[in-house]
Amino acid sequence: MISMPNPNKYNGWTNYETWLCNLWFDNFEFTDMLDMFNGVEDKDDIRIRIEDYIKEYVEEFVESYLAPGDTHGFIHDMLNSSIQEIDFRDIAEHYVDDVADELELVNEDAKELASVA
């Protein structure tokens, strides 16, 4: 069976909303925030934490631009509709390997220091 490309993809991302979110919020430096990955067991745990972080960040960013108390109305509904279309997992997956590599280096350094002490 021949696999057909997904016609809903946008510039390699899940959809337009995901691409746009990544375009505007592509400056996360998760390798500088390694504390948030304490206790992770594998790359899936890393991805979940990144996904949750980005989603929360975007939602708070959008809420900060709405008028206080503006929880109803056209603009609010349109923003919420668009946010629901963002594939935060797709975005998070682009950071996982870098974070996993950095965590591995930190763990190796810690083991080396422990063996010297």
Image (cartoon, rainbow, N blue to C red):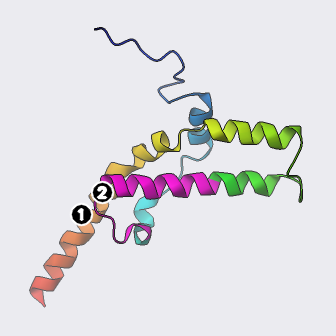
Q: Identify the residue under disc 2.
A: 100
Q: Secondary structure at mark 2?
A: helix
Report x, y in % for residue 63.
77, 55
How many neighbours does mark 1 have within 10 angstroms: few (below 14), some (14-19), or many (20 or more)? few
Report x, y in % for residue 98.
34, 53
Magenta stretch encompasses residue 44: yes
Residue found 30% across the figure and 61% down from its top: 102
Q: Is residue 24 above or below residue 19?
A: below
Amino acid type at image mark 2: Ala
Closer-to-camera residue (39/19): 39
Quarter holding residue 30: bottom left
**Which secondary structure dominates the residues rendered in magenta?**
helix
Instruction: Point out the residue furthest to the top here.
Output: 1
Q: Are the residues flagged by discs 1 and 2 in contact, CB closer than 8 Å?
A: yes
Q: Is residue 60 above or below residue 8?
A: below
Q: Which residues are magenta?
A: 36-57
Report x, y in % for residue 94.
41, 43
Left or right, residue 63 beside residue 12: right
Marks 1 and 2 sit apart, C-alpha to C-alpha, by 6 Å
Which quadrant: the N terminus? top left
Report x, y in % for residue 26.
54, 46
Instruction: Point out the residue furthest to the bottom here.
Output: 117
Magenta stretch encompasses residue 51: yes
Q: Identify the residue under disc 1.
A: 104
Residue 86 is tagged as none
Amino acid type at image mark 1: Glu
How many neighbours does mark 2 have within 10 angstroms: few (below 14), some (14-19), or many (20 or more)? some
Residue found 55% across the figure and 53% down from its top: 54
Quarter holding residue 17: top right
